[in-house]
Image (tube, grey):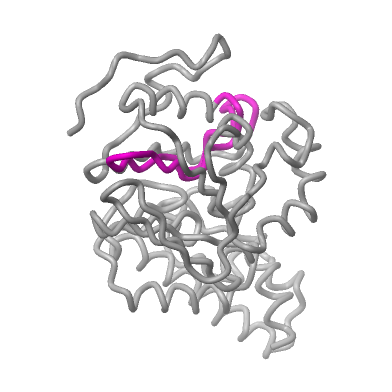
Amino acid sequence: MMALLPRISVGSERLLPEGDYPMEEFQPGLFVHVGRHEEMLPENHGDIGNSGFIVGDHSVAVIDPGGSAVAARTLMSRIRQITDLPIDYLILTHFHPDHVAGASVFAEATHTIAHHHYIRAVAQRSVFYIERFADLMESTSPEAFGVPDTVVEDSLVIDLGNRELELVAHAVGHTDNDLSVYDRNTETLWASDLIFVERMPSLDGSLTGWLNVLEQLNAANYPYVVPGHGRPSAWRDAVNPQWDYLKTLKKSVKKAISDGKTLSQVLEPGAIDSAGEWLLRDTQHFTNITKAYIELEWE
């Protein structure tokens, strides 16, 4: 465990209370804040996704600044309680506002890194997200979501000082711009929203593609994983419930389509099994069914 440094001020701006923003050292030098299992709202400052940072001998990499400027400033404050090393990298794992709406707080990071489709996603969706979540952001410019100076086409290795992180740009899955981060020192995969724990997975890319990505990740046999939502854990404990859910969703929707059922019919309560108990099921399951149906009816 690293010794705590005296707290360094990040300015007079509002921060979340200490008890509302717990930070766990899941592995040596790998710190995770687990967001709330709630919808993204001004009342919770958009603090619903996992954020954190990894510390090397020479520098720090921040992974997903969080869903608001307040949450991101709180993350900055926690970093400065632990280390005064420079923040060389801000890593944006995908373009969903609960993970990146606070990116402007880390504008001074030496490098901002994202999937090569991230910039396209910002162009396509930033206006909608800004209008919907303006209360959570410092700016109404698309640049508030971060401006990558480095994009990952396939994979990229960065070194924090005796600590190498391997960044991989995945094919379409949860989104079309998913980036994972593998910490070689601790054999921990920061999968972000490629993995959900307890909270129902949110389909925004391709159901078939997501299952393919999970197969590829599973073959790598990672010991530990940091999900995008929920507590970090052993890989198998995290991936199995989600895998069951996504496979059941695909099988059930394909059968419904084969049986000639319309989308309105498959959206009837109980028509498609949710494969287990999930938080936020009532708000997410039917969205997943709709997206799966639209995708699979053309397979």
Give x and y (percent) for residue 282: 59, 51
**Vertical placement of residue 251 versus 98, above or below:** below
**Vertical placement of residue 65 versus 294, above or below:** above
Towards the viewer: 70 or 275: 70
Towards the viewer: 113 or 95: 113
The image quarter containing residue 181 is bottom left
Give x and y (percent) for residue 266: 68, 72
**Vertical placement of residue 14 versus 211, above or below:** above
Based on the picture, tell me whether residue 22 belongs to the magenta stretch: no
Give x and y (percent) for residue 59: 37, 39
**Vertical placement of residue 180 versus 292, above or below:** above
The image quarter containing residue 214 is bottom left
Based on the picture, tell me whether residue 56 belongs to the magenta stretch: yes
Give x and y (percent) for residue 64: 51, 43
Q: Quadrant of the N terminus?
A: top left
Please give the name of the residue rendered at 48% of the width and 49% of the height, measured from the top-left corner.
279
Please give the name of the residue rendered at 69% of the width and 29% of the height, measured from the top-left corner.
137
Q: Where are the magenta residues, as a range?
A: 41-70
Please give the name of the residue rendered at 59% of the width and 29% of the height, measured from the top-left corner.
105
Towards the viewer: 81 or 235: 81
The image quarter containing residue 134 is top right
Towards the viewer: 5 or 215: 5
Residue farthest top in this picture: 12
